[in-house]
Image (cartoon, rainbow, N blue to C red):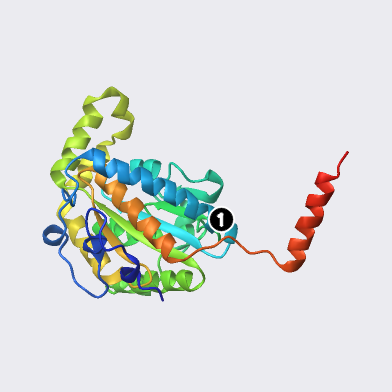
Amino acid sequence: MRNFVKHLPESSGFDLKNLLVEPEKKISLRKDFDPKYTGSFKEKEGASAALESNIEQLAREQDILYAGVTYALLVVLQALDAAGKDSTIKHVMSGVNPQGCEVHSFKAPSQEELGHDFLWRSAKQLPQRGKIGIFNRSYYEEVLVVRVHPELLAQQHLPPLGKSESIWKRRFEEINSFERYLVSNGTIILKFFLNVSKSEQKSRFLKRIEEEEKNWKFSASDVRERRYWNDYMDAYEEVFDCTSTDWAPWFIIPADHKWFARHCVAEIIVATLKSLNLEYPKVSEEELAELHKAREELLNEK
């Protein structure tokens, strides 16, 4: 299995390793990771320029990924409301070929989805080889939202074993096995938690209420969920402790400054794709002969 720590750049205005949740190491989300952190960038302009460079590099790497049809890249984005998931996708992926990139947002599960195992609806949307798949929320909702609101388990039609107290430990193990299986079959997995502070979330919620063009983004349920802030912090910490692995690591992205969060995500994606040493497919001698033949035919057309 890949060890992503080895492939992260030494320095890019900050140390990417500081954002990584090291496997088998317990972390404190509140103490170890500062949502306001911006590395050596003190203003938006410097990070935005670095982002533009990464967008160009990502476009090149994606083109080779698409041509090679050997690997797929799955980007998992998790966050509390108003952390900037949508805008991160919009900006980081602004230069990629839409044919090679798919975005899937996971809302509350439908009745059909509740009739299957908790990984089913995500497994259906996995990217095929050569493509980048982005999950805006994911199967991790089943150990986050459902963990904070265990009454939701009643809707999942679980057998007796699935209702036992060990359900969360089992789900962590099942997720790790699922991700290990995907990676061993060529799907590279990067998991990002956009870490927004409670005060910044409040500020963004108020903007959504006060600015008419942003009203559509706001839901009263967003405020209700703020009451469970500490419960979510506890649930996320256990997710990171139990599911950040060498083959599918978690990165905790400071998200109080959206411009820095976008730069971090782009930097890690580009570094990961570069570490694969991707190349355009090489044609065989027979295929090369066919190319020469086709060239001659085109040049001799009347």
> Does 258 sit left or right of 176 as displayed?
left
> Where's residue 21, x and y in %?
25, 66
User: Residue type at mark 1?
Assistant: Tyr
> Where's residue 164, x and y in %?
30, 73
Instruction: Confirm whether residue 115 shows in the render.
Output: no
Residue toward you, 214 or 46 = 46
Residue drawn at x 88%, y 38% is 302
Q: Which residue is mark 1?
A: 66
> What residue occupies the far left of the structure in this picture?
31
Residue drawn at x 40%, y 46% is 55
- Residue 171, compared with residue 219, is above or below; it is below
Residue drawn at x 18%, y 57% is 233
> What residue occupies the far right of the structure in this picture?
302
> Where's residue 127, x and y in %?
51, 57
> Where's residue 193, x and y in %?
28, 55
- Residue 119, compared with residue 94, is above or below; it is below
> Does 274 sit left or right of 262 as displayed?
right
Residue toward you, 233 or 45 = 45
The number of callouts visible is 1
Residue toward you, 145 or 162 = 145
Instruction: Confirm whether residue 269 shows in the render.
Output: yes
> Does 226 sit left or right of 56 as displayed?
left
